[in-house]
Image (cartoon, helix red, strand yellow):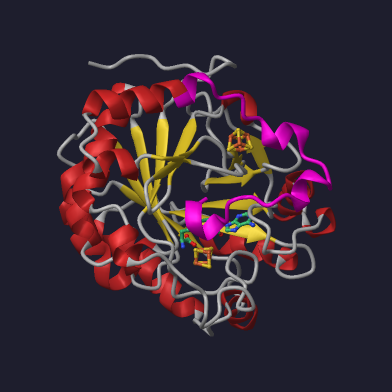
Amino acid sequence: MQSETADTRGRHLRDLRISVTDRCNFRCTYCMPKEVYGRDFQFLERSQLLSFDEINRLVNIFKDHGVEKIRITGGEPLVRRQLERLIEMLAQDPSLDLTLTTNASLLKQKAQLLKDAGLKRVTVSLDSLDDTVFRAMNDVDFPVAKVLAGIEEADRVGLNPVKVNMVVKRGVNDSAAVEMARYFKGTGHIVRFIEFMDVGHTNGWQMEHVVPSRELVEQINQSFPIEPVEPNYTGEVAERWRYVDGSGEIGFISSVTQAFCRDCTRARLSAEGSVYTCLFATRGTDLRMLLRTGGTDEQISDVIGNLWRARTDNYSEVRTAETAKQRKVEMSYIGG
Ligand code: SAM
Ligand code: SF4
Ligand code: SF4
């Protein structure tokens, strides 16, 4: 039975982002800088990670609170072994919108398995088409060509439309935005430009690094005229635009310059089973303990319901240079 769980601002719980690992084979400089995530970094032990059965159980409880969309993320979700088994479990409910965000390094090998398991679509992160810039940004010398091959394979097996996320950082890859739009224009894939955010506290975020989406809209519009499109649904994160010539759509995720907290329906589950009601949260609520000490579904459901009903989060509406320095949960831990 589905109940409607609304928070203190009347926002319903609709989306759950599940991080299945805190590990990643990339070291994107804005997410897992090598100086922090080096050889000595203590990642979670396997026993600390929620098992697929535990995740599946939690998802069923979250569904009772209104969750209808699941995004699997990480770290890099495809480095978690046999991820397709989890997909298969979650896909038992065909009404669930089941998607995954990946750096695509393993997508070429995995796309068909994921599709067969019941995954609906993928979002691929790609910050530049310039091989030198991209290799420097992922900081493990990973080539653009392999990401593009992953995108093609995802499209071929039907995990589409593929969304391509580009985080734009001033002075690093901002000059590559128009080229990114040009490359995917007419392919059916949807590029989304993301403002660099002050997630966590290890990425050295400063306001000067942010390229406001307005600026990119103008740049792209000069090369390829675009016009705004109505959102698909309330709470859609990306502002949608389409090419006037009918050759497709692009999106802008402007968490910094145009906060969308008012419609934020997202909860996040970390790989070790803590729930966060905001991407910029400083602490989560542990569910693993209850799961592993005989907690009943009702008890777990009560914790989730009470947490969501008490939710007041609106970080992006009140962000300042000071809040940006606070110790917040890291992106690679919570999954974006
Ligand atoms: N490893 C997968 C990937 O990169 O797609 C999934 C996890 S990653 C944390 C999810 C998304 O968060 C990626 O698209 C990444 O570019 C984005 N991201 C990471 N740090 C960010 C930041 N500081 N600001 C904006 N987006 C960020
Ligand atoms: Fe890994 Fe994704 Fe973070 Fe890059 S953005 S370091 S691929 S988790
Ligand atoms: Fe949602 Fe928090 Fe982002 Fe606002 S800042 S949109 S509440 S995740």
At a point 45% along the width and 62% down the height, the residue shown is 75
Q: In the image, residue 211 lies at what x, y percent?
A: 77, 54
Q: Is residue 11 above or below residue 266?
A: above
What residue is rendered at 44% in x and 71% in y? 148
Tell me if I can see residue 153 in this picture.
no
Question: Looking at the image, which residue is at 33% across and 65% down?
Answer: 78
Q: Which residues are magenta?
A: 307-336
User: Is residue 283 in view from this perspective?
Assistant: yes
Q: Is residue 107 above or below residue 92?
A: below
Classify residue 224 as left or right of residue 43.
right
Is 333 within the magenta? Answer: yes
Left/right placement of residue 310 relative to residue 124 reads right
Q: Say which quarter of the image contains residue 243.
A: top right
User: Where ligand 1 lies, by image quadrant?
Assistant: bottom right
Task: State which quadrant residue 299 falls in.
Answer: top left
Residue nearer the viewer, 263 or 217: 263
Name the residue at 42% across, 17% down. 5
Closest to the observer, 37 or 205: 37
**Image location (x, y in percent) of residue 241:** 61, 39
Residue furthest front in the image:
293
Total residue callouts: 0
278 within the magenta span: no
Q: Position of residue 286 (x, y in %)?
A: 41, 41
Nearer to the camera, 73 or 300: 300
Rendering coords of residue 178 (x, y %): 68, 61
Depth check, front residue: 168 or 273? 273
The N terminus: image quadrant: top left
